[in-house]
Structures are given as structure tokens and as C-alpha cells.
Amino acid sequence: MEVITVKDLTKDYGNGRGIFDISFSVNKGETFGFVGTNGSGKTTTIRHIMGFLKPQKGEVFVLGKDAWKDSCEIKNFVGYVPGEIAFPDLQYGTTFLKAQAELLKIKDMSYANYLIERLQLDPSANLKRMSKGMKQKTAIVAALMADKDILILDEPTTGLDPLMRETFLELILEEKKKGKTILMSSQVFDELEITCDRVALIYNGRIVDIADVNELKNLPYKNYKIEFKTRDDYLKFKTLKFEIVRDQEKYNQVTIKIFDKEMNRLFNILRNYDLKFISEVKHNLEKHFKEILQEANKKGG
Amino acid sequence: MYFSKALFKQSVKANWIKWVAVTASTCIMLAIVIIVLGNLGINDIRDSLKQVFVQADQESSVKEDVVDSYDLYLATLLNYNQNVQFSSYISIITTKYDGKVQQFEQDNEREPNGEEKSQIILEVANEMKPFSSIVGMTEDEMVMLVSSVLNVYIEDTSVKGTDLFDKYFLTQIYQQSYLEVYNREIENGATEEEASITATTKADKSQEIAVDAISQYKQDKETAGTSFQFNIENYYSVATNYVNTFMYENVYQTQIASGEDEEVAKQYAVSVKVISNTALSTYQLWLGEGKTQEEARAEATKSISDQIPEKVAVALSELGNMDIYGLIIGSIFYKIAGLLLPMVFVIMTANGLIAGQVDSGSMAYVLSTPTKRRTVTATQMTYLLVALLAMFSLLTVVSVIAVWIVGGDAFAINFSEILLLNLGAFLSMFAIAGYCFMCSAIFNRSKYSMSIGGGLTIFSLVCTILGLFGSEVVPSAMRISQMNFFNYLSVITLFDTTSILNGSINYLWKFGVLFAIGVVTFIIGVFRFDKKDLPL
């Protein structure tokens, strides 16, 4: 079941800025990631889903409802962490959270208190004097405390220290386990790789690729980088029929792509060679997207 | 219902300090303006100026009275002297008349009726014709004179001889004076009753003067005996002295009668005597210089206000009529000073309620909850209006108490006027709040909302300040009428304090316009916010 559906969404701000023909969908229980550089269009897309912006072209549905027209109804099911941290003109974190709870019509604050404890937040601090990380934690509590089915998080980890980031990612995984549908944007590949089922790369306002993280983790082949001690060995190895992804003649290095079933053959062959080292070149999300972007640029250029 | 209690509470919490500061300082300002100025009696200067002009008017009328009396005195002497020869014929005429009446009674065995009496009078008059040349009259004049004298005689036949002549003479003066004054009063728009009262008073006075003039004449004639030679020039100083004394006595008696202290009455009477003397010397001097009687009279009756240039006189008399309280409380406090702080509150708050929250991004927290955009705008609008209403309710209470302290309805500005001033100030702020709110709902950036909403508001205030120098409430000596142009650029001009304090109803339709501006701008703001993109 599709919880969030974005079809041909376009918002042209002129001068090539904006988003163009964005299409994707998020299924129930799925965690969907958004990655891209600053100004690539992640936030603009999220604002459309939240019903803050009216599409120029295309449609956005949340739970089958039009995100612009039925924006208010949709909010019954959505928790949101905005990209910019700015709180209403209130004095303390507690005042803000209480006001927010009232708007969300929450009476039972036990889950909110659990979140506060998990994130080690001191909500009694003055809102204006809070550090960036404190503010971000407050915003996360405000978004999660209503225990809504859909979470839309716009760069939720900015300002968090590495330890807190870990805790936050654990929290997200907990939510995911509860069966929540999560849409999350970030500039950090790692955290998306940990939490997301699928990740979309946005570049210059367009979705360049949507990668399946699980697929990426369980590829049937691996890349190995091998350096030989002698040039003879290096040249001899190259005559063998392995798929060479990268060739660095200067250092007597090759990177080969090899399917798991050929592993034994490779090691049998290498027994007769004098090696300096052999290491696996991990194929992660970052690498995956870099390759795709390079290809796209080659085509474009 | 488009209202969120939680959001309303949030707005109260965010703005209450501002509200308290603005309300308190405005209330204190207003109380000071009313109470302190009320006790200083700033209208004293105005009143004394006004007094000058009232006195000037009085002076002028006293002088006219003086010249009138002087003229009358001399005219009486002249006329009396001319006709005095005739008085020796009076006994002949009355004897003739009596004889004829007696004859009639014998013939008809009854008294003659009115018509028959007129017939007899005419007969006597005709019989007197031959004497006309002796007294220096035409025959017709003689007939008229005899008839007139006999008409007076038949009212009371016991008065004979010279007394009858005097009675006739005085009756003439009385009637002449009465008619003159009566007609003038009617011309000036007085009712018949009023005119008759004024004319009677004046005629009585004229008669009194004439009696005195005649007795003076007789006394002189008796003293001089057969050598009596009448010369009017000898009587100029006599007339002057007489009039001066007459005015003195007259004023003294009136003052005593109205319960004044003897000393005060004397002082007042002396000052009138001085005025009288001045007027008469001026009159005589100008007559001596060969001016006509009218010209000389105009010079003699001039008052202070006639002697200063016309423009200055107008300016001074306006200054005397200016309502300083109306100016300071109405035009300066309620339209300028008292609106400044509420304006600052409205500009800041209206911006902070919507545009500020959109600009900073904090609006995202409200709109990520199941709260409609219209609920947000309607709630914020309600907050702004409740805050303003509370502020002006307090201001109203303070102003009413302050007015009560300085004298209630006896104060230059009464209760109903002060209530209307407060209502007007609230409606002005309502219109301004609507406009600022609309800008706040239209723009996503605080700087645009502030500069367009707040800018125009402050512009309006500045125009009101500049326009004040061209408005009617400022006396013409200080007024630059071209500055009135600024009033057309300011929405506050629709708050017509002058009309409220004048008691005219012009302010009513202007209140309506202010209300309409507020309603329309608020509605535009609410609807615009529903449809626009929000960068949250």
C-alpha cells in the first residue's frame, strides 16, 4: 500500500532552481531516504508533501488524500521535523512542548517523557539559549511524541553530536519496527544506509536514482583491489580474464570485480603471485551514487 | 469554528509584556494630560484674551451710547431754542380750544367725541395760521405744530402753558427715539417683543437726557434774564460734562443694583467715565477738523479691536476662541501621542503573529498539527483584536476617571465626548491593525511585512503631525493652510476629533469608513493566507 505518492511534481523557481518531474512513492512500513546537496530540492519536495506549497504541476497524495487540499486532515497522521530550527516565541522548552501537545490534542505525556529521557534532553532550559543540538532534540520530541503513523523528517540529525546521532538512529529503527512509514532526508549517506529501505538521490531538482539499500548490501559480486610486488606479476595477472574495474599502472594495482562463486579460482591463481596486499573495496551507497553521478555527468558533458 | 485555544494562549504568552508596557505607558500619559493640564487651567489665557474682545465690544457700545447722548443733548437744546417763541402762543391755542369745546357742549348738551375733537383741533389750527410768519414758520408747519400740541393737550387738559409745550416736546423725542431703536432692532433680527423692550429703555433714557437739557436751558435763561442770548457753542463743554456724569451715575447705579461692592462699582463707573470723556474729546476734535458727523462718530467709537490691523485682530480673536483642551486632548493626544505606542504594538504584534513566524519557520510547528491555516489566521486575528480592545477599554476607564477627577461634565471635555474620543481611537487602531495584519498574512518575509504594514502606519502618523499645522484646530496665526494637504494622506484623518468636540455628527460616517477598512483588510489577510505558498 502506498502511503506517500508523488507524481511528476514540478515547482519551477526560475534560473534552473526548483524541482522538476519528481516521482516516487513510499509504501507502508517503509523507510525512504532523500539525499542530495544543499539546494538540490529535498526540502521543497517535503514542503509539498506537508501541504505548505502548492504544486505547479503534478500531484502529491498522502494516504490517498491530496496533500494541498486536505493538508489539515493529513496532519492527523503525520509527525514533522522541519529543516529549519526556529521555535515559537515562548520561553522554555517545556512551555513549547506543552503548547505543541495541546495543538496535537495529546493528554498522555508518557511517550514524550520517554523520548526526552532517551535523547537526554533538558526541556526546562530557555528556548532561546538552547544549543543547536538541544533545539534539534526538542524538535524531534515534538514530532515523535504524538506517535503518528507517518514521520517526515527534514535533516533530523543536524547539530546532533555523534553519540546522540547513534541514539537517534536507534530511535528511528524502533519506530520502523513499530511499522511506521518514514520519509527522511539527509546529507550523510551512512545514516540513510543504516535506517532506510530505499534512498533517492536528488540532484539539481531531479531524482537521478532510487537505490534499494538491501540490494546494495547483498550484491552477488565484490570488488577487490590487488597490488603486486613486481611489474612482471602485474602484467601477467592482467592477461588473465578477470573483469578489471580500475587499473593503476603506476602502482602495479588493479581493482577487479568478481562474483562470489569465482572466489576459489581467484585465490588459487594468486597463490603463485607475489602480492603486496589485497583488500575489498566496499560498494556502499556513497560509492553507488558517485558512480551514477559520474556517469550522468559524462553523458551530460 | 476557526479558533484554536492553544494557539491563542501561545500568542498571549508571546506578547503580554509588550501589551502591558504599551497599555500602562499610554494610560499614564493620558491621565497626566487630562489631570495635570486640567488643574493648570490652561484655558485662563484663552479666557483673558476672550475677555479683551468682549470688553472691546462693550467699550465700543459704551462709546456709541456716549456720542448718541451728546448729540441728543445738543439737538434738544437747539430744537427747544428754535421753538421756544412758539410756547408763548400755547395759552392762546388752549384757550381757543377750550372755548370751542365749551361752545360745543352748550350747543349739543354733551362732550365732543374723538372725531369731533379732531374737527375742533383743525379749526383752531387754521385760525392760528396768521401767526406763522411771526414765529418763522410756514402756514402748513404752523397747522401741523398746533395740531400736534393740541393732540398732547387733550390727553390731560390740566397741563397748560409752557409745561404743555415741554410735555409735547418730550413726547416727540420719546417717540422718535423709540421708533428709531425699534426699527433698527427689528432689522438686526430681534423679535418684536425684544425690540420693544430695548426701544423702551433707550427712549426712557433719551427722554431723561432731554428733560435735563431743557431744565439746563431754562435755568440759564432765568439767570441771564432779558440779556439771554442762545449760542450752541457755549453748550459743548456743558454737554460733555453732563454726558460724562450721566454715564458715571448710570453705571454706578447699575453696578450697585446688581449687588456689586461700592468700591468696585465706583471703579467701574470711573473707567466708563474715562472712556466717555475720551470718546467725546475725539468726537469734538474730529468735528473741529471739519469731518462730517458720521466720520467723526466712527472715529470716536473705535475700540481696541478696531485699532489693530484686521489680520491680527482676527488671529487674536481666534486665539481667544480656541479650545486648547480640544486641541491637546483631541488632536494631539488621541490622534498622535496616544496612538504612537499602540501603533508600535500593532505593527510588531501583527507581524509577529504571522509573517514573523513564517519567516523564522516556527509556523511549521503549528501547521504540522491538525490545525487549518484559517484557524491560525482567525485565532491570531482574534488575539490582536482582543488585545486592542482590552487596551482601549482600560484607556477608556482611565480617561473617564481622569475627567471625573478634574470636574466631570463641567470639564472642557465631557463624558460623552471622552467616550467618543476613545471609540474613535480604537476604530483608528482597528483599521491600522487590519492593514498591518493583511500585510503580515500576505508577505513571507518579516522585512516586507514590517516595512509595508508598519511603514504606511508610521507615514500616516507623520502626516497627521504635519497636517495638524494646517488644520482648523490650530489658530490662523500658527496655521499654514497648505499643510492641510497632509491630512488627505493619513487614514487617521478619518478620526474626526473636531467633529466630536463640536457636537456635529460628521464623525459618524468616518467611523463607518474606519470600521470598513479594518473588516475588509482582515478578510483579505485571512483569505490570502489560505492560498499562498509557505516556506516552512
Image (cartoon, helix red, strand yellow):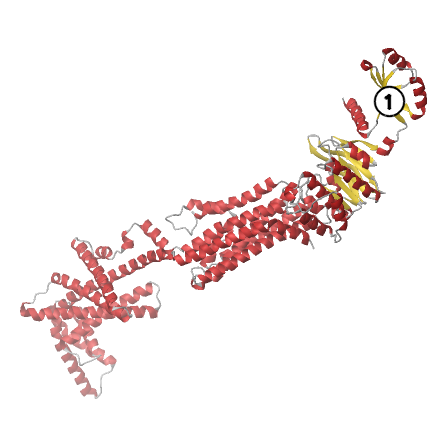
Q: Nearer the viewer, residue B83 or B501?
A: B501
Q: Is residue B501 above or below residue A5?
A: below
Q: Amino acid at mark 1?
A: Tyr
Q: x, y (%) of residue A173?
A: 81, 40
* Chain identity of mark 1: A
* Quarter assignment of residue A30: top right
Q: Is residue A52 above or below residue B200?
A: above
Q: x, y (%) of residue B458?
A: 52, 44
Describe residue B3's horizontal placement relative to residue B489 as left or right: right
Q: Quadrant of the C terminus of chain B?
A: top right
Describe residue B468's horizontal placement relative to residue A200 as left or right: left
Q: Residues within 10 Å of mark 1 (few under 14, many from 20)?
A: some
Q: x, y (%) of residue B128?
A: 14, 74
**Whether residue B62 is visible:** yes
Describe residue A81's horizontal placement relative to residue A233 as left or right: left
Q: Residue furthest top?
A: A232
Q: x, y (%) of residue B202?
A: 26, 68
Mark 1 element type: strand
Query: Disc 1 marks which residue?
Result: A224
Q: Quadrant of the N terminus of chain B?
A: bottom right
